[in-house]
Image (tube, grey):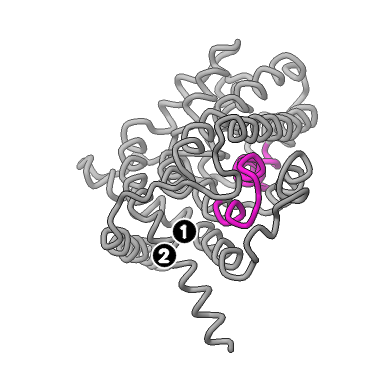
Amino acid sequence: MWQQIIGVLLLAIWGTLCEMAPYLLFGFLVAGLLSVFVNPEIVERHLGGRGIWPVVKASFLGVPLPLCSCGVIPVAASLRRHGASRGATTAFLLSTPQTGVDSIVVTYSLMGGVFAILRPLAAFITGLVGGWLVDALADHENGKDTDPSPPCTEACCAPVAAQSNKLVQVLRYGFVTLPRDIGKALMVGLFISGVIAAFVPDDFFAGVFGTGLVGMLIMMAVGIPLYVCATGSVPVAAAFMLKGVSPGAALVFLMTGPATNAATLTIIWKVLGKKTFVIYLLTLAVCALACGLLLDYFFRVAGLPMHHHAGHTMIPGLVNTASGVILLAVLAWAYLNKCRR
């Protein structure tokens, strides 16, 4: 009995892993390239200053930037210390954790082009709205311009490696540092998606609990306390959709889950102030609900199926399987390197 349950669970996890593996490996490579040529020091230099333009740049550059969950915090605190407004810092904190190059390609692989386009767009809009509101309403709030968190010493926080070989830096960040940072959250996301896919009946969430505003509020209630990385949240959202959750409710989960970890909320409260903290949460909640409602409306008008994801499936099964094996090897190697440190 238990052997059968475990077998069903492992098959569900393996199927999702293989489906996303080719795109995730490609995302790792692109993230490695960005980490070498767009490092946090460059971000800090270009996002300093006040006004709406730094908010726009902070929100825009935060979307693809391959900063890990620990790396966002010291970079944002450093932005603030070096003259960035509360608005630009808040925009960076809102848009960066929601997505990244790796999560965008994984979203495309599991949930289709609509989600792959709308997810980074929603992250940008959320950062822009939140940053503008903070500049308008909380710019003169007293706050401590210090970093409340211990300094991050991982390569993801300042990925200017000691090696002079750029290729080595790209491969080290893309296939060691980044997998080490997101590997645990990714496996947790895969496990949760496997449990949902294997044991939750089809269309279980269909109806009032999976659609409309109620379904979105439920997904928000799940996403806010359950922190998963931007990439690890994708298989969970895809599994929810297969069981009856609407696309809009799934998008709410994708937006709120990665952006509400305790460390990020702590730095907002201590460095940027209580008013900024409230604006951050309200902006994220309202923008997530608005984007979710718009997405459901688009699916209805376009006549697209509401409860099934539309992942990209043109890659041959053998390539998916080989990529799954390679991805597991990359994650294992990254974990072993972490243990040796």
The mark lying in front, picked from 1 and 2, is 1
Horizontally, is 174 left or right of 269 in the view? left
The label number, if any, that marks residue 183 in the structure image: 1
The C terminus sits in image quarter:
bottom left
Q: Earlier in the sequence, mark 1 or mark 2?
A: 1
- Residue at 67%, 54% (x, y): give it: 226
Determine whether label 1 and label 2 are within 8 Å by CB.
Answer: yes
Start-end of magenta stretch? 238-267
What residue is at 64 percent from the left and 39 percent from the top? 248
- Determine which residue is flagged by label 2: 335
Disc 2 residue type (three-letter): Tyr
Element under disc 1 = helix
- Dominant SS type (magenta): helix
- Residue 241 in view: yes
Which structural element holds mark 2?
helix
- In this image, 175 relative to 180: left or right? left
**Residue at position x 51%, y 76% in the image:** 8
Question: Residue 104 appears at what percent x and percent y?
Answer: 45, 40
Q: Residue at x 56, y 39 (%)?
A: 98
Query: Is 295 a magenta residue?
Result: no
Q: CA distance from mark 1 to mark 2?
A: 8 Å
Asked if one can make out residue 77 in the rendered structure from this viewpoint, the answer is no
Mark 1 neighbour density, 10 Å: few (under 14) some (14–19) many (20 or more): many
Asked where in the image residue 74 lies, by quadrant, the reply is top right
